């Protein structure tokens, strides 16, 4: 039986940050977005882990701007 593939992190709020080609909705890079459909479960898990890292960094950066 094949392992179930992780779901897309897309939140339908697509807007690429010009500085790093990262979506400000799901925090995937353009390459990760376009390659998602062909990625296997391990690749998707790696993408999701990188997205979580980017989101954490983004949120920390946003907090420093509010000070």
Image (cartoon, rainbow, N blue to C red):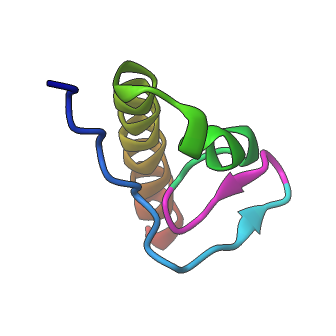
Is 41 rendered above or below residue 48?
above
Residue ranking furthest to the bottom: 13
Q: Can residue 55 be found in the magenta stretch?
A: no
Query: Where, quadrant-wise, is the N terminus in this rendering?
Result: top left
* 11 left or right, relative to 30: left
Quarter of the image where one finds residue 63: bottom left
Q: Can residue 23 be found in the magenta stretch?
A: yes
Q: Which residues are magenta?
A: 19-26
At x 38% / y 38%, what residue is drawn? 48
Query: Where, quadrant-wise, is the C terminus in this rendering?
Result: bottom left
Viewer-proximal residue, 62 or 6?
6
Is 44 rendered above or below residue 65?
above
Viewer-proximal residue, 34 or 13?
34
At x 63% / y 74%, what residue is drawn? 14
Quarter of the image where one finds residue 36: top right
Is 53 rendered above or below residue 26?
above
At x 78% / y 50%, what residue is drawn? 21
Residue ranking furthest to the front: 1
Residue ranking furthest to the left: 1
In the rendered image, residue 43, in percent from the top left (x then y), is placed at 45, 23
In the rendered image, residue 23, in percent from the top left (x then y), is placed at 64, 60
Q: Main secondary structure of the magenta part?
A: loop
At x 20% / y 28%, what residue is drawn? 3
């Amino acid at each position: 039986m094949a392992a179930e593939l992780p779901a897309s992190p897309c939140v339908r709020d697509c807007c690429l940050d010009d500085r790093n080609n990262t979506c400000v909705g799901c925090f995937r890079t353009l390459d990760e977005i376009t390659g998602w459909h062909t990625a296997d479960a391990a690749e998707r898990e790696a993408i999701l882990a990188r997205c979580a890292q980017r989101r954490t960094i983004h949120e920390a950066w946003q907090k420093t701007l509010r000070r």
